[in-house]
Image (cartoon, helix red, strand yellow):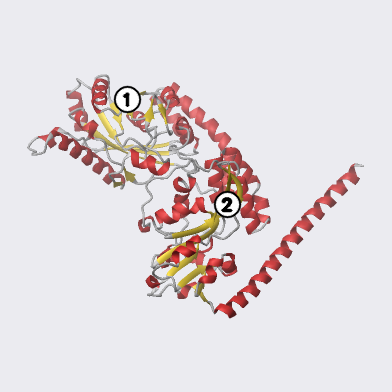
Amino acid sequence: MAKLFSSFFFKSLFIFWYRFLLIQLKNHLIVFHRTISNTFANTTSSQIKYQKFTSLVHRSDLNDHTLIFDVENTLLKSSSLFPYFMLVAFEAGGLFRAIVLTLLYPLIYLSGEKMGLKIMVMTCFFGIKAESFRIGRSVMPKFFLEDVGSEIFDVINKGGKKMGVSNLPRVMVESFLKEYLEIDFVAGKELKIFNGYYIGLMDETKNVHALKQIQEGKGSSDMIGITRFNHILDHEIFSSCKEVYVVSQGDKRSWKNLAKEKYPKPLIFHDGRLALKPTPSESLAMLMWLPYGLILSVIRIILAISLPFKIATPILTFSGIRLTSSLPENSHSNKQNRAEARDHGHLYVCNHRTLLDPLYISFTLQKNLIGVTYSLSRMSEILSPIKTVRLTRNRDKDSKMMKQLLQQGDLVVCPEGTTCREKYLLRFSPLFSEMCDEITPVALDSHVSMFHGTTASGLKCLDPVFFLTNPFPVYTVQYLNQVCPKKYLQGSSENVEDCRFHVANHVQEEIGNTLGFECTKLTRKDKYIILAGNEGVVKDGKSFTNQQ
């Protein structure tokens, strides 16, 4: 009986896969036959010129034309769309949805391009609230920009008007194309909504509204299309082009990635927990590591809280944490100067990478410091092994409180007010410049391989947990030469207020030069407007968004 059942099971399984693969093969043959027939018919009727992409590179008249390009098949080097949907699944849908999408990957791969796309859209978007979906603006641009081909971007950038055509949902690609690559028009699939929630289905009607817009004005009569050969007829928009340039897989493999210096708009802010590009293999590795990483993170937190610095430091280093520090050349004279004035504590001013900044400075100095921050979750405050104090954003109250804290010991302050992941420094608040006679700037940098330890829209209390979940989180602490604010007041014609800002800008510049970061005038408010759609304000002890 068992043998009979086993034989029946394997026979049924064989028949199922045989019919499934046979149907897929027939569909591909039919599509291929129709594509060849339609291409031949359209070529005869409309006289569209099909040329190789290499012949477009050296044209000097592109500024007089409208360039219409296929986003997935020409602009992006990668041929797989799975990583971008994995970002949506993990960041917008949560861990369970990410696990389901990873398990469905074999089915997605075997189902073909169109059916696989529908499966990913259904898995990632079903039940997501449309109004609160901001992943397309806060998370996706970073990963899309890192996948742009430099050669194709140089060509597109020469066009008079530029239009991106995509089979992806418009909410995934529109911000990336319009805000960061300065593309004029975007044609993408619209997601269907019911009662304010995505239902995981796309509107199959073509988005010709953008084409109607682009036909008004310069270059509309001479439109040039850039796409892949077997995708020419996927969008009726390309049938309006007089010339179509075809990109091959060989062309895409030879392209270089677009350098950050060539971004039309610099990528300063981005959100999301994932630091890696979640390809199928990377996603599987990340999900397999996550349970062990969470256990390791809890162990690291317990060690940091319960053990003295001298004992905890080597054990934490053995667990995989990488911490390096350096002192300025005249550090010995600085220590002597500090020993002569012990009526108050010393002030350390650092840039803000994660919530663990004050803690890492404490570990390098092997002493307890007082961390002053603009916003802090209750959980992080409880778990912190050093004293932490929240600022109220009222200048007079905060100034008085910081002076009182300096009487109790050494103080660490992050005047940026929020974290920044990229190589930029936000504007430094000048509040610290009036606290004491000597200030020690500290340049901090951190690197992670899987998870970011900061968020603008997630749970703030999990920031340290995610950072310490990484197998080998890296922190670099560099102490710079002391700054004396009084020197800027002596012999200066500026008033006290201007000198405060001058000191703050000087400290920001010194830290920026040390790290190789670019100094900006952007503030915490700018960050939260971009990433969360609000100013990140606090009301009655509760944040409208989980703040940095």
Task: Work out whether 242 lies above or below 546.
Answer: below
The amino acid beneath tag 2 is: Phe
The amino acid beneath tag 1 is: Leu
In the shown orientation, is residue 533 left or right of residue 519? right
- Which residue lies under the disc numbered 2? 82
Quick one: 43 or 424, which is closer to the camera?
43
Q: Is mark 1 on a helix, strand or loop?
A: loop
Quarter of the figure that contains the C terminus: top left
Total numbered labels: 2
Identity of the residue drawn at 17% across and 23% down? 341
- Quarter of the view holding residue 508: top left
Task: Work out whether 341 lies above or below 111.
Answer: above
Query: Could you tell me residue 59's position as x and y percent?
Result: 40, 75
Query: Could you tell me residue 190's position as x and y percent?
Result: 55, 53
Quick one: 1 or 172, which is closer to the camera?
172
Quick one: 486 or 514, which is closer to the camera?
486
Query: Could you tell me residue 126's position as x and y percent?
Result: 60, 44
- Quarter of the view holding residue 22: bottom right
Identity of the residue drawn at 75% across and 60% down? 23
> CA separation, marks 1 and 2?
45 Å
Identity of the residue drawn at 57% across and 70% down? 229
- Which residue lies under the disc numbered 1? 369
Q: Can residue 431 be seen in this view?
A: yes
Q: Is mark 2 on a helix, strand or loop?
A: helix
The residue carrying pointer 1 sits among few (fewer than 14), some (14 to 19) or many (20 or more) residues within 10 Å by Cα, namely many
In the shown orientation, is residue 237 left or right of residue 331? right
